[in-house]
Image: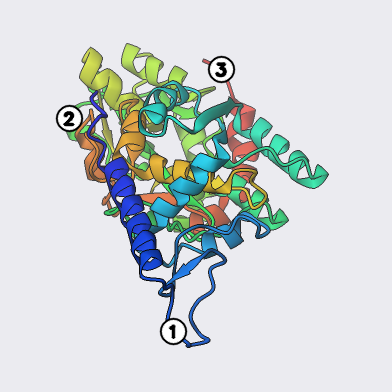
Amino acid sequence: MNYSNNPRKGLVRSASSAVLATVLLLAACGGGSTSDDPSTPDAGGTETGGEIDAIDTSVEGATAIFDQVKDLPLDEAMALIEECAIEEGTITHYTHEDDMVPGWEEVWPTLYPDIEYQGVIGDTTANIEKVLAEFRSGNHTVDVVAGNAESHGLYDTEGVLATHDSFYTVENFPDRAKFANFTSQNINPAVIAWNTNLVPEDMAPDSYDDFLDPDFPEPIGIDGSPPNPMAALVAAWGEEEVRSWLTELFETKEVRVIEGHGAGRNLLAAGEIAAHIELFVGDLEAIIVEDGAPIDWYAADPSGASSAGTMIAENAPHPCAAALFANFLSSVEGSQVVADMGTTVQNPDVDFPYPRLIELLDNPNLRVIYPGSPEAESMATARQIINEIIVPNLTGG
C-alpha cells in the first residue's frame, strides 16, 4: 500500500509551516500580540495574537498539555503536537492487539521517521495489571494504552487517564466514538450465525428466540465466556429474562459450550454444530469470503460489540507523541491496518475488505459497549450469569 501521499501528514506539515511563517512575520514587524485584553488565553507557550507558537511542556500532566491546544482548529493543534512530539522522540504503546502491531510498525515511520514507535504487547489482563502497578508505584512508562470499556473503568477510577476530549481525531471521525478520556478506534460485533447446509433457508434465525424453536437444528454452540453479547442482552431484556432464556435454551436444546470463538467458528464451518449464538463477524466474513465457508450470519436485536479504544496516560512521559499516535490510529493510515485484519473500524474512509461489515456501523440492532453505556453498566451482571449458567456446561472445543 502506498503511504507516500499521506493527507494527514501533509496537513500537519503545511499547518506547521504556516504557524512558523506567522511567527517570523510578526517578529520582523517587531510585534507579538497587541491586545491589552486580560482575557486573552494563556496556553502556556509563546502567544501570537491570542494563539501559541509552541506548547509549554513544563506544565504537569498530559491534560495540561492538551488543554493548550484542544480548542484550536485540528490542523493547528496537530502541528503544535507534532513539533512537540518530535522533541520527545518516542511513543510507548501498551496493547493486546498483537496482530496489528507489525502493520503499525511498518506504516508509522513512513509518516513520522523522527519518532520511534514502541509497541509493548500483552494480553488485556496483563496490561491492566502492568498499567495500574506502574501508576501506583510512580514508575510511569506507558504513553498510550489500548483497552475497552471495562479496562477504561478501572483506569478512570484510579485517575490513570488524561482528559483530551478526543481532540486529535481526524476529520469525519464519528462523534459516537469520542469520549473525554477514551477514543474508540474499532468495534468487534458478535452476531448469530448458522451453517447453511444444516439450517434450511426458511429457518434462518433473526432473533434469539428462534433458537428455542423445537424444530431448529442442533447442536447449537455458545462461547464459554461471551461477556459482550450477554451484557447487551442484560441491558436490553433485564437480568431475569436473560436468565430465563438461557435456562430454557439449555433445558430444551442440545447446546455445546465451546471454549474460544475461533474454535466455535471452525466447528460451525465444518458442520459439527448447526448454529452459534454469538461469533465475531469479522472472523466469519473472512472464511465466508476467502474460503467459501457455508455460513451466514445476522445481527439480531441486540448484538453486542466490544469497543477497542485508545487511552492516554495522565503521567505519560511523551504526551505529545501519545496524542500524535492517537491521531494516527484514528486516521485512514492507522485504521487501514486494522481494517485489513477484518475488524470493523470507526473511520468511514477506509477500504473495508469485507463490504458487509460497513452495514453494521449504523445498524440499529448493534449495541456497542462504550464507556458509561448501559451495556458497560451491565457487564458485572453478565459475567455473573455466564459463571452460573454457561461455564458449568463448558465442554471445550
* Residue 266 point in image, percent of width and height: 39, 15
Residue furthest out toward the right: 137
The quadrant of the picture occupied by the N terminus is: top left
Q: Eyeballing the image, is 117 above or below 238?
A: above
Q: Eyeballing the image, is 157 above or below 255?
A: below
Q: Amino acid at mark 2?
A: Glu
For residue 294, side relative to residue 93 (left or right): left
Residue sitting at x 35%, y 29%:
337
Q: Secondary structure at mark 1?
A: loop
**CA distance separating discs 2 and 1:** 73 Å
Which residue position holds label 1? 35
Looking at the image, is mark 2 or mark 1 nearer the viewer? 1
For residue 14, side relative to residue 252 (left or right): left
Which residue position holds label 2? 201
Q: Amino acid at mark 1?
A: Ser
- Viewer-closest of 354 and 381: 354
**CA distance separating discs 3 and 2:** 29 Å
* Residue 387 point in image, percent of width and height: 65, 37
Residue furthest out toward the bottom: 37
Image-quadrant location for residue 396: top right
- Viewer-closest of 277 and 122: 122
* Residue 342 point in image, percent of width and height: 32, 28
Q: Secondary structure at mark 2?
A: helix
For residue 294, side relative to residue 91 (left or right): left
Number of marks in picture: 3
